[in-house]
Image: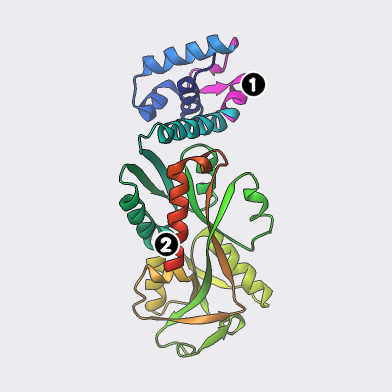
Amino acid sequence: MIEARHLRVLRAVAATGSFSAAARELGCTQPAVSQQMKALEASAGTPLLIRAAREMRLTQAGEVLVRHASGILAGLTAAEEEVAAIAGLRAGRVRLVSFPSGSSTLVPTALARLRAAHPGTRVSLVEAEPPRSIEMLREGDCDVALAFRYGAGKADGQAEWDDLVVRPILADRLVGLVPEGHRLAGAGSVGIAELADESWIAGCPRCRRQLVDVCEEAGFTPRIDFATDDYPAVVGLVGAGLGVAVLPELAIESVRPRGARTVAVEPAVEREIVALTLPDLAQVPAVAATLDELTRAAARA
């Protein structure tokens, strides 16, 4: 019989390429990893690893097990959490991953309310942008992913999440950011084409791609002189007069835009903020409560 603990070890070995690295990741010894892999191969009745001098590679059977491991482990986690809730333990664990502007705006309110309502629930937070956050969810490295997408229904949106539970959270409009002394700083709204000749400061890769798409639809290609995933850096560069930018409203909320002014941009562009989880995990009480609190935090944003 294949045991869950053996699957966790196999996944760690496949990800790190060695027993010693897997042991460090799992917090155990290298002999313990080796012993558990031998037990798993005995249970499977076939070799799962090819042991070479410098690295370890998966056999075809090993690849099959690793491919199924995330779903199996997610199902087991869901079962354990539901059993704990039924038994009245009133405890739970939620691993949340969020993009930075969500972490500084929506997440604090949601987690504070979650802790007040369910003090026995432990929540951890790490940051990652989509698509990496989505990969983490599918790989079993988190339980809830707060993510975003542009153009819901496009190939990189709807189809990307077909196998996940999608909880809509917020429509986050993009706004323009220009230096205080800019000719358009006092404008009520600005057509994106009016910024065609400007130097641009771009954000994360997905936002950068969206910026290029919107500008090209308006008839020009933006000249991106600076690109950074750090929103305070974008605001600082604009405030120093080094260019203009288009940022989501959540990003502006999390940063004091010194030396910069926000303007409405036409045509209006929004990114959809969503909370994602796996179907099995959506039934876990602590995960469901986290989704509910994220939704409530957005309603107050």
Q: Quadrant of residue 42?
A: top right
> Can residue 121 be seen by looking at this rendering?
yes
Secondary structure category for the residue under label 2: helix
Residue sitting nearer the eye, 57 or 127: 127
- Write down the residue under mark 2: 297
Q: CA distance from mark 1 to mark 2?
A: 46 Å
Q: Position of residue 68 (x, y in %)?
A: 59, 28
Between 166 and 115, the one lying in front of the other is 115
Residue underneath mark 1: 60
In the image, residue 86 lies in the stretch drawn in magenta: no
User: Could you tell me the amino acid type at mark 1?
Assistant: Gln
Which image quarter holds the N terminus? Answer: top right
Question: Is residue 54 part of the magenta span, yes or no?
Answer: yes
> Magenta segment range?
45-67
Task: Check the image and report above or below for 85 versus 258.
Answer: above
Name the residue rendered at 37%, 18% in the picture: 30
